[in-house]
Amino acid sequence: MPRSNRPRSARGHEQEPEPLDLERALLGRLRTEVKRDGVWNVQPQAANSAVKSYLCPGCGLEITPGTAHLVAWRADGIMGAADDLAARRHWHAHCWKITP
């Protein structure tokens, strides 16, 4: 008989699934990073969500559609959050990692 990989729980004590956090689902894994020039919001962009091409400011090469990458914008800008978000840039993950 094949083995079942399903987790077993005591009868009648099954846990209900955690409700979906819509904001987290829409924003992905948003994190804050400190670089030499300030504080940045960084959000990964999955390959299946990347539908446009962008130029990476780190290397100047194209990020083609279907390529996983990062989106970064200032978290400490003086003009406000809306302007910071409008100035966001798409980076290759490696380029962002090696940028001081």
Image (cartoon, rainbow, N blue to C red):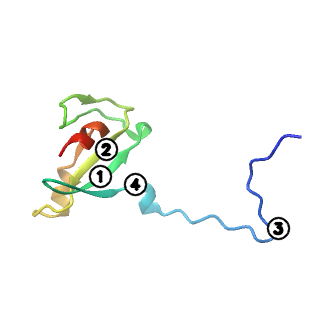
Task: Find disc 1 in the rendering and name its residue.
Answer: 42
Rate crowding at label 2 as few (under 14), some (14 to 19) or many (20 or more) other CA atoms within 10 Å. Answer: some
The answer to which quarter of the image holds residue 82 is bottom left
Local SS, label 3: loop
Expressed as whole percent of the image width and height from the top left, the position of residue 62 reads 25, 29
Tell me the element at label 2: strand
Query: What residue appears at the point 24 percent right and 37 percent down from the top-left corner?
Result: 95
Labelled pair 3, 1 in contact (Cβ < 8 Å):
no
**Nearest the eye: 93 or 54:** 93
* Residue matched to label 3: 11
Q: Amino acid at mark 1?
A: Val
Within-10-Å neighbours for mark 4: few <14, some 14–19, many 20+: few
Q: Are marks 2 and 1 in contact (CB under 8 Å)?
A: yes
The answer to whether any part of residue 92 appears in the image is no
Residue 24's spot in the image, x, y percent?
43, 60
Q: Position of residue 21 (x, y in %)?
A: 48, 64
In the picture of the structure, the residue carrying the numbered disc 4 is 29
Image vertical order of residue 93 relative to residue 86, above or below: above
Ranked by sequence position, the earlier of labels 2 and 1 is 1
As measured in the structure, the alpha-carbon distance from the residue carrying label 3 to the one carrying label 1 is 43 Å
Q: Are marks 4 and 2 in contact (CB under 8 Å)?
A: no
Residue 9 drawn above or below residue 88: below
Residue nearest the viewer, comparing 92 with 28:
92
| Disc 4 to disc 1: CB gap under 8 Å | no
Query: What's the residue type where badge 2 is placed?
Result: Leu
Secondary structure type for disc 1: strand
